[in-house]
Amino acid sequence: MDGALVKEIGSKALLYGGGALVLFWIFNAVKLVIGARGINPLVKQFFDQIASGRIDGAYQLTTKAYKQHVNRQDFIKFLASLQLNRYRNLKSGRPRIEDNQILLTLNLKSEDKKTELPLDFTFIKIEKNWRIDRISKVKR
């Protein structure tokens, strides 16, 4: 009788624990989706600015802290080193939340899909707008 009671309590505890884990995951997923609203339009605007040759417009989408570490000339050199004109397709990875930042890996793909350029972006919300706080090539 004691073994059956332990088994029943263990099964219920496992179910409750699993349910709590699922609720926790759903809560965090909803929080991420709601919190990340506005990032996709920012990414599109950033690459549209670059594609149309408005580098200053793209630079203005970065944070003040980014501009203190990366001056305009270094930003232009960084973009030139990426050779963005070789890429046509953009695939977004899963966003990750760390503190008040959202980290996102964007994979730029060539038209023939043979070449990929992964870039890590860090976004920070300033007032009600998202801004780019860091851009770096992913080391492989």
Image (cartoon, helix red, strand yellow):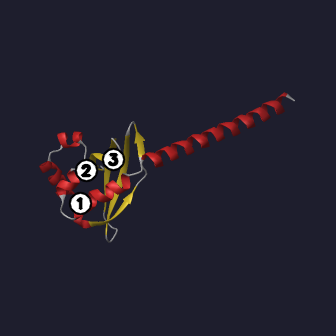
Q: Secondary structure at mark 3?
A: strand
Residue depicted at x 49% and y 44%? 31
For residue 64, which quarter of the picture? Answer: top left
Q: In the shown orientation, is residue 36 left or right of residue 43? A: right
Q: In the shown orientation, is residue 80 left or right of residue 5? A: left
Mark sitting on residue 95: none
Location of mark 3 (residue): 130
- Can residue 13 be seen from the camera position used here? yes
- Disc 1 from disc 3: Cα separation: 16 Å
Location of mark 2 (residue): 61
Location of mark 1 (residue): 49
For residue 108, which quarter of the picture? Answer: bottom left
Residue depicted at x 34% and y 58%? 107
For residue 76, which quarter of the picture? Answer: bottom left
Q: Secondary structure at mark 1?
A: helix
- Disc 2 from disc 1: Cα separation: 10 Å
Going by the numbered disc 2, the residue's amino acid type is Leu
Residue count near mark 2 (Cα–Cα under 10 Å), binned few <14, some 14–19, many ≥20: some
Q: Which quarter of the figure is the N terminus placed in? A: top right
Q: Secondary structure at mark 2?
A: loop
